[in-house]
Amino acid sequence: MKLKKFWRITKKYYIKLIRSKGTPHSIALAIALGLFIGCSIPMGGQTIIVVILAIILRTDKVLAFAATWISNPYTVTFMYPVFCFVGSKILGSNLSFADINRLILSIIHDFSWSALINLGTKLAVYFFVGGALFGIVIGGIGYFITYKLVMKYRNKKNRFKDRNKKISDKKNNNSKLV
């Protein structure tokens, strides 16, 4: 039952996305920006940052904000430890995934910026490095997919309009002959 509801909601927002106003680049950029910020900035700081960047980049603020929800209370318990682990490996640390997972879970249950800072600068740096890497990759993929979906929808819509216009023109020409 919950899966049907999930797919219904997903389809609803997919349709809203592909029908969004703006250029395909602008729409895709908003999604990429939101995905990047959703991965690279902890929950609680995402909204103001993504809105400011969307204004600067002149892209859709609502779509960018919506895409930040890639990190939400259900996904961060998996995402944040992975970001920290990857960031620690990039920076040459020997922290295990289990150590990072234990530390992150303690902060998720009672999140605050001060608690995040208390975990230590190193862990925060690991998070930002890993989150930025994932944000770049996921944002890039999100841009590409969104751009392709919007273009596909608009091309199909234009072909449909052209076909209907030809049918209408043909009917008008036939009625003039009679």
Image: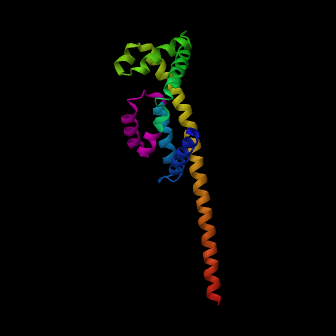
Viewport quadrant of the C terminus: bottom right
Asked where in the image residue 125 lies, by quadrant, the reply is top left
In reply to whether residue 50 is colored magenta, the answer given is yes
Residue drawn at the location 41% of the way across and 37% of the way down? 50
Q: Is residue 111 above or below residue 16?
A: above
Figure coloring: rainbow
In reply to whether residue 29 is colored magenta, the answer given is no
Question: Magenta region: which residues?
Answer: 39-66
Residue drawn at the location 49% of the way across and 13% of the way down? 102
Q: Residue 27, image x and y in percent?
A: 49, 47
Looking at the image, residue 168 sits to the left or right of residue 39; the answer is: right
Residue drawn at the location 59% of the way across and 54% of the way down? 153
Q: Residue furthest top?
A: 94
Q: Is residue 92 visible?
A: no
Q: Is residue 146 above or below residue 163?
A: above
Viewport quadrant of the N terminus: top right
Q: Residue 156, image x and y in percent?
A: 62, 58
Looking at the image, residue 177 sits to the left or right of residue 29; the answer is: right
Q: Residue 174, image x and y in percent?
A: 65, 84
Query: What predominant SS class does the magenta segment belong to?
Result: helix
Q: Is residue 5 above or below residue 84?
A: below
